[in-house]
Image: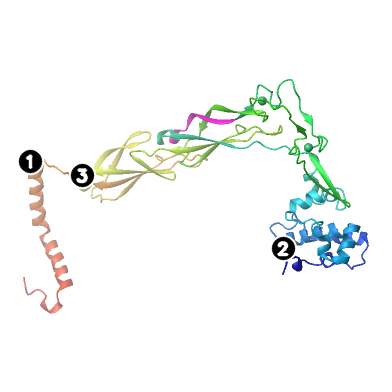
Amino acid sequence: MTAMADKLDYYEVLGISRTASDREIANAYRKLALKNHPDANPDNEEATLRFKQAAEAYEVLNDAEKRARYDQYGHAGVDGGGSQFHEVEDIFEAFGDMFSGGLFGDLFGGGRRRGGRRQRRGADVRSDVTLDLEEAARGVSKTVEFTRSKSCKTCDASGVTPGSSKQACSRCGGRGQVVQSAGILRVQTACPACQGAGAIISDPCRDCRGQGYTPARVTLDVAIPAGVDDGMRVRIPGEGEPSPDGGPAGDCYCFVSVRQHRLFERDGSHLILRLPMTYTQAALGATIEVPTLDGPYELNIPTGTQPGDVFRVRSQGMPDPRGGARGDLLVQTYIEIPKKLSSEQEALLRDLAELEHANVTPHRKSFLDTIRNYFAPASENGEDE
Ligand SMILES: [Zn+2]
Ligand SMILES: [Zn+2]
């Protein structure tokens, strides 16, 4: 089975009889195209398919010679002669006149694809910058370096060796577009001889090889907003590649990396600080000087602080680059056990241990009881003591 066998009958596609007049064919196509137009049916693949099928049917049936061959031989008669509209854009190219002021009026703004060559925007370029956390917190001006094209001075961006000139393309007569006619259908495409430029360079500039542009190293100062995070991009408008045809330049996107800080870990707009304290500080309470991005801060640790307790220092985190509230500094405590003790410390700790032993014995006993109860049968309970 060939693909052709799956093709729908063109008369059925347009919903007309085999004796339909040219006017009926055009009317039927107009109705279908309006109904299934992609602008009226966004993201509707079925409508797009019907739109394409109708265009294909119309292209054949509206052409007397093709229609005659189709009537006699079916799809085989026009295969290769009829357009295969794979892309909706192709249909606008082929029926551009009809979509703008022609058969359909300007209902869908079909003229947007006509009216001369559209100016293209230059490409975007990338640059990179690496910051310290402090710089990211305050915002900073950084110098970045990257490569982009600049007009060739030798040829004044014309691409032509000075003294010579471009020749108008003979294939398209300098228009850059060629029109292929089939019946009333006009298919307009970029000229294959000059790639749409409309002119041929026979003696290209040696410095830019006819491009009109040469790569150049660019140095720029970028204002990095306060609060910027690792992986964010800062857009520098208009600092990308120049447009190939006089349109606006592209943008430069500056990719930001933020170095890891030795004290602070970032979590969104908050900063996390892991703070060591001694057993005595945790048990007795203390005022500890902690670092913040704005300098030292006196943090009050209450008595009986547990390892892992978190204290919040308001508004000592990172600023929001979009102007929101500043984050907090979250101080998470942990108990540091000394690896070496002075003889005095050891003596005091041993005293403390003895005191604790005496004090906590009842607790300890009940704890041991709990374990015994857990492992031993209930009947033997208490007999060992
Ligand atoms: Zn040049
Ligand atoms: Zn040409």
| Residue 140 inside the magenta-drawn segment | yes
Up the image or down, 196 lies above or below 4; here it is: above
- In the image, which disc is placed on residue 278? 3
Q: Mark 1 falls on what kind of element?
A: helix
Most foreground residue, 64 or 117 = 64
Q: CA distance from mark 3 to mark 2?
A: 71 Å
- Of tags 1 and 2, the one toward the viewer is 2
Q: Quadrant of the N terminus?
A: bottom right
Q: CA distance from mark 3 to mark 1?
A: 18 Å
Indicate if the residue with disc 1 has its beta carbon within 8 Å of ligand 1: no
Q: Going from the N terminus, do you reach mark 3 or mark 1 first?
A: 3
Residue 104 seen in this snapshot: yes
Q: How far across and how far down the image is residue 364, in percent?
A: 13, 62
Q: Mark 2 falls on what kind of element?
A: helix
What residue range appears in magenta? 136-148
| Residue 283 inside the magenta-drawn segment | no
- In the image, which disc is placed on residue 343? 1
Instruction: Give the side of residue 79 with respect to residue 273, left or right.
Output: right
Residue occupying the point 71% across, 21% down: 162
Q: Going from the N terminus, do you reach mark 3 or mark 2 first?
A: 2
Residue occupying the point 71% across, 33% down: 245
Q: How far across and how far down the image is residue 368, in percent?
A: 13, 66
- In the image, which disc is placed on residue 265? none
Q: Residues within 10 Å of mark 2 (few under 14, many from 20)?
A: few
Q: CA distance from mark 1 to mark 2?
A: 87 Å
Amino acid carrying label 3: it is Thr
Q: Residues within 10 Å of mark 3 (few under 14, many from 20)?
A: some
The residue identified by callout 2 is 46
